[in-house]
Image (cartoon, grey):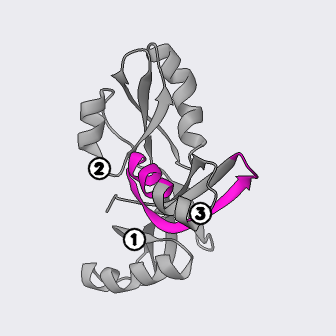
Amino acid sequence: MRMLRGVRALTVVALVVGQHAQEARAANACNVEVKAGPLWNSADANTRCPTTCGGQSFAAWDGAWWTSLPGQKSVCQCRDKVTVLEAGPIWGDTDAKTKCPATCQQEGFAAWTGGWWTTVWGEMSVCQCKNKVTVVEAGPVWSDKDAAIKCPTTCSANNGFWTGAWWTTVPDKMSVCQCGSLCT
């Protein structure tokens, strides 16, 4: 990838090799499994999974899906968004371990992925940052006490943990829990 000087951020998506769920799960531990209701075949998955993943604030569907309960539950595997940010010159892995987490945090991203590279020798390097916080619908949540019961379960079901934040999006009908990713 070529980075033009003056461009601050560029969203990229890591590719996952393989069409089968087992290969995809092994290829990228930071993919997230999202419930999709019943999927009847690959054509159905090709139609519904991209929307399912996009609706959950992930970058895209990675092509993997499987049925966990025939006729009732299927899962689309979605990959997380990765953003590349300029960080000034980075002189090696040790320097990156200091500069990249700070660069990601300064720009409001939750974590550094560990990825970095130099775009202009001696002048500019970039860090891969990941927003590890997602919002998941949880049905109506009536209070902080109710959230403390519903949100941990909701986030866990989406391969995450509850950050402690929640809010109502549709009064008396829908609330969301803020979930952190278990990916490292």
Q: Please, is residue 86 above or below residue 50 in the view? A: below
Local crowd size for mark 3, using a 10 Å CA cut-off: few (<14), some (14–19), many (≥20): many
Residue 70 x %, y %: 37, 16
Q: Please, is residue 175 above or below residue 38 in the view? A: below
Q: Is residue 1 visible?
A: no
For the residues labelled 2 and 1, the Cα–Cα distance comes to 15 Å
**Amino acid tagged 3:** Trp
**Numbered range of the magenta stretch:** 150-173
Local crowd size for mark 2, using a 10 Å CA cut-off: few (<14), some (14–19), many (≥20): few
- Of the numbered discs 3 and 2, the one sitting upstream in the chain is 2
Residue at left offset 56%, top offset 26%? 48
Task: Report the residue marked by disc 2.
Answer: 29
For the residues labelled 1 and 3, the Cα–Cα distance comes to 25 Å
Residue at left offset 55%, top offset 58%? 177
Q: Nearer the viewer, residue 149 or 74?
A: 149
The answer to which image quadrant residue 26 occupies is top left
Discs 3/2, front: 3
- Of the numbered discs 1 and 3, the one sitting upstream in the chain is 1
Residue 142 x %, y %: 64, 57
Q: Is residue 183 visible?
A: yes
Local crowd size for mark 1, using a 10 Å CA cut-off: few (<14), some (14–19), many (≥20): many
**Amino acid tagged 2:** Ala
Residue at left offset 40%, top offset 84%? 99
- Of the numbered discs 2 and 1, the one sitting upstream in the chain is 2
Task: Report the residue marked by disc 1.
Answer: 112
Task: Report the residue marked by disc 3.
Answer: 166
Q: Please, is residue 170 above or below residue 33 in the view? A: below
Q: Secondary structure at mark 3?
A: strand
